[in-house]
Amino acid sequence: MRKKLLRFALGSSVATATALAIPTIARAEEIDPVAQVQATLDNIWVLVAAVLVIFMQAGFALVEAGLTRAKNVANIFMKNLMDFSVGVLLFFAIGYAIAFGGDMTGLGRFIGGDGWFLAGDGVFSYGTLDKFVFFTFQVAFAATAATIVSGAMAERTKFKSYVIYSAVISAIIYPIVVRWQWGGGWLFQLDTPFHDFAGSALVHMTGGIAAVMGAAALGPRKGKYGEDGKPRAIPGHSIPFAILGCFILLVGWYGFNPGSWLGADPVVGTIAVNTSLAAAAGAVVAMMTTWLRDGKPDVAMTGNGLLAGLVGVTAGCWVVNGLGAVIIGAVAGILVVYSVIFWDRMRIDDPVGAISVHGVCGAFGAIAVGLFSATESEGIVKKGLFYGGGADQLVSQLIGVVAIGAFVAVTTGILFFVIKKTVGLRVDEQEEIEGLDVHEHGVPGYVNDDMVLR
C-alpha cells in the first residue's frame, strides 16, 4: 500500500475522499513556487521509478531464460515482451479504470469503473502527480504481476494460450485485487486497514498464485519426474543469465519500493535501506541453507534468495525498521529453499521457482507486516505484534492474504481450465522435446554457424 495514495481514500468521509481525488486546477500565478518545484520533482521521481520497474521485465526475462533450456530462450523473451505490450494496452483501456475509477462505496468497494482509456472527467489522479505519470507507474506493476507466471509455465505452454492468460490478468484479475487495497476498496476499509505498501501480496502473491494454478493445469515437463515419482534436475542453460537477471531485478526494485512513496521525499532513503537489507539477508541465508543442506552453496538458489528477500520486504518496507527488514529477508531466504523442495514433491513443476519466490514469500511478506511493523499511522497501519501493537494488524494481514489468494486461485483456475478446453494450453510432445523457439516462433533463440545456409 502506498501511504500517500491511500491517505485520501476514506478519511473521515467519502466526500472528503472524492474532493482529494480530484486534481486542483489553479492559475499559474496562484501556485506557490516552492510547491511548483516540489510537484515537478514528484513527477520526475515517480516517472524515473516507473522506468526502473519497467526495466525489471529484462531481469525477469534473463532469470527465466537462464534457468531453462536453450531451445526455449526465444519463447521466454517473447512472453516477457508480450506481458508488457499486451498489459499496457489493456490496462490503459480497462484495468486502470477497474483499479482506481469510480466511487468507493457499495460495489465500488470491490471493483471500480470510471476513466476507461484514461478519458473523461472520471480519470483518477493523485496529489501532485500528473495522471499520465501515475498511470505509467501503475502499468509497470501490472506488467510485473503478469510476467511472474511466465517462468512457472516455461518450456511447455502454447504461446497463444499464454497471451490470452496475460491479457485477462492485466485487464481484469490484477486490477480487481488492486482495487481492494490501493484503490481504496474493502481491504483498506477494514477497521485496521490491510497494509501492503508496494505489493508483496497485491503484485507478487497474485502472480505466484496464478503461477501455481498454471503449472498445475499444464502438468510437469517431460522427464521431470522419474518412474519412482522423484523429481529430476533439469539444469538451466545459463547461470550467468540468471544472476545478471537477479541484479537487474534488484536495481529495478529501487523503483518498485521507494517509488511507491509517490513523491520526492527523504523517506525514500529509509525504504531503500530496508530494501537493501532484506535482499542481502535473503541471499546470504539462502546460500547458507543450501550449503549446510547439500554441501555446496547453490548459485541459482542464492539468486532466488535475493529475490525472496526483496519480495518479502515489499509490503512492509516503509513501516519496518532495519532489524525487521533483515529478519524478514532472512526468513524469506529459508522459505524459498524449502518451498521449492515442497512444490517439487507435490509434482508442481516450476522451472524457475516463481511460485516460491513470489507466491510463498509474497504471502509471508504481507503477514510479516502484522508482526514487524514498527510504525503507526492513523487510518493507514498499526504497529505489529512484536512492537506492542497487539494482533489487530496481524489479523487484517491474514484476512487480506487469504482473500487475495482465494480470489486469484479461483479466477485463474477457471481461466486456465477454459483455455485448456478451448484453444489448448500445452504444446504437443514433439514440440516440447525439440523446443518452443522453432515450433512456436519459427526461429531458434541461438544460431550456430553450421545452422546457416551458405
Image (tube, rainbow, N blue to C red):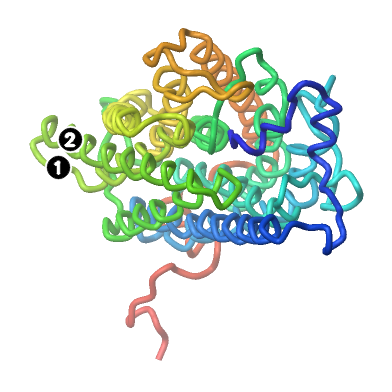
Residue furthest toward the bottom? 454
Relative to 385, say whether 298 is above or below. Answer: below
Please report the residue visible at 39 percent of the width from the left and 60 percent of the height from the top.
71
For residue 129, above or below residue 426: below
Q: Say which amino acid is labelled 1.
A: Pro
Category of crowding for the residue at label 2, using alpha-carbon neighbours closer than 10 angstroms: few (below 14), some (14–19), many (at least 20): some
Residue 365 relative to residue 397: left or right: left
The residue closer to the viewer here, 24 or 427, is 24
In the rendering, which numbered label is found on residue 297? 1
Q: Secondary structure at mark 2?
A: helix
The quadrant in which the C terminus is found is bottom left
- Residue type beneath disc 2: Thr
Element under label 1?
loop
Estimate the x, y position of residue 351 in percent, counting from the top left.
37, 42
Q: Quadrant of residue 384?
A: top left
Which residue corresponds to the image point at 14% horizontal and 42% vertical from the top-left? 297
Residue matched to label 2: 290
Residue 344 in view (yes/no): no
Q: Tell me where residue 187 appears, x and y as whole percent.
A: 66, 21
In the rendered structure, the answer to whether residue 116 lies left or right of residue 252 reads right
Q: Residue at x 28, y 37 (%)?
A: 282
- Viewer-side residue, 331 vs 301: 331
Residue 257 in view here: yes
Residue 182, located in which quarter of the rendered image? top right
Q: Earlier in the sequence, mark 2 or mark 1?
A: 2
Looking at the figure, which quarter contains the N terminus? top right
Circles 2, 1 touching at the beta carbon (< 8 Å): yes
Q: Position of residue 413 (x, y in %)?
A: 61, 28
| Depth order, front residue of 400/370 | 370
